[in-house]
Amino acid sequence: MTQRDDRALRRQLERYTLRFNDAFWRFWDEQVAPVLPPAPVIVDVGPGPGLFLRDLSERLPDATLHGVDANEAMIENARAIDYAGPVPTLVLANVESAPLPYDDGSVDLLTMAAVLHGFDDPFSFLRKQATRVLKPDGRMLLFDWFRQPMREYVERRLVEPGEPEETRYERALEQFRIHNKYTLDDWLWVFAQSGMRIEAETSEPHPFARVWLLRPE
Amino acid sequence: MTTDSRWNQSAMVERMSSDFGRRYPLAFWEFFESQVRPRTGDAPAIADLGCGAGLLLQELSSRLPDATLRGVDVSKAMLANAKGLDYATAASSFTLHDLNHAPYPVEDASLDLCISANVACFLDNPFVLLAEVRRMLRPGGVYLLFDWKRQTLPGYIEGRGGFGNDPAALMSLQPYHNRFTLDEWRWLLAEGGFDLVGEAHPRTSHVALAGVPR
């Protein structure tokens, strides 16, 4: 594992509960779980170290779980952790440059947490890939960042865990452009351009993120 | 200037050369003449940080034929083009350097005018640039920042001529071009130790700011 991979993995592990907190799971229980079939097929795109799949495994004993990630270190971590229920099938692939490795119309729920903003072309991914693999009544659960004023973003990053103190400021400046790629209005435009409509949303899990339950139109 | 080898350098040289008039419209030069030039004197030492293909320096040389010009860029292809242009000034020099890393190859307090045009938005840490500009400027010197300012996503895409055949290529630049709002540029200059002495918006997508070290 490279030093960069190790740092990314550590950061994801330390920050998991900042994203998937009580407010997130409340949204899951109220808006997502009720629309899933009893034995859903769920694909997590960019599962990182696999902690979300681990929690889904515990909550959904009859689910079929998949994860696809471009980072080998993340996939290795996801393969190594314990799952209380179904064990996910994990695939190493870059789905920004290659099609999602799943059959057409085969997925009940496609999840992406803090991943899509990093894609150069989110429009094609949503319109062609996500829409293709979802079943006719399938949904997409998207957790992603929206733009903050630079000062607020940098100040928050300076106190969050996962970065050595001496590199936090530079890291915050460097990450600013990626995490702040889209305003909320930009995201809504991306969805509209990509044929996705919002079925439910929440701002409660994280002050810089929004969680959307999307459905192809 | 670019900091990423993904972008085809020879194609960028060609585009920068053919597109110069649109990228630096009359409103830019009106700002330069009214807000910047009165501070530089008639024979200034000028550095264009991230000079790219050299077109901006060439235009400056025709406006200020007694100036001394320096160009700094991370791209060999850009510098090769810049070196090959004709300049009205007697003295010009070009240096290969990555502006993400200090120190820049210019002596302390040696410049009357520093320019960064479409560069700061690409740097990992723009405060490195601002600190180096402060170091290199003489007392009374001026910094001209010309850069992208944030637009809405549909406004940005429309301004760049639509998605075209390769949306991913278009969108790969969006995080850089849309990185800072106008207020954030002003804040960066203030945090970097500059007083703002001029501001203009020569293009819908761009802001020009003139700053002097505080």
Image (tube, coloured by chain):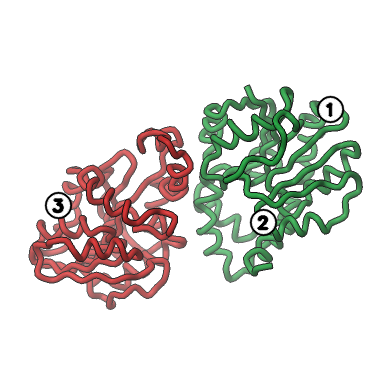
- What is the chain letter for disc 2? A
The numbered dot on residue A37 is: 1
Chain A color in figure: green
- What is the chain letter for disc 1? A
In front: A101, or B190?
A101
Whether residue B140 is visible: no
- N-terminal of the pair, mark 1 or mark 2, is 1
Q: Are marks 3 and 2 on the same chain?
A: no
Residue A139, percent across and down?
Answer: 71, 29
Tag 1: residue type?
A: Pro
Q: Secondary structure at mark 2?
A: loop
Q: CA distance from mark 1 to mark 2?
A: 30 Å
Q: Would you name the residue on which mark 2 appears? A: A71
Q: Would you name the residue on which mark 3 appears? A: B33
User: In the drawing, does residue B56 fall left or right of residue A103?
Assistant: left
User: In the drawing, does residue A96 fall left or right of residue A21?
Assistant: left
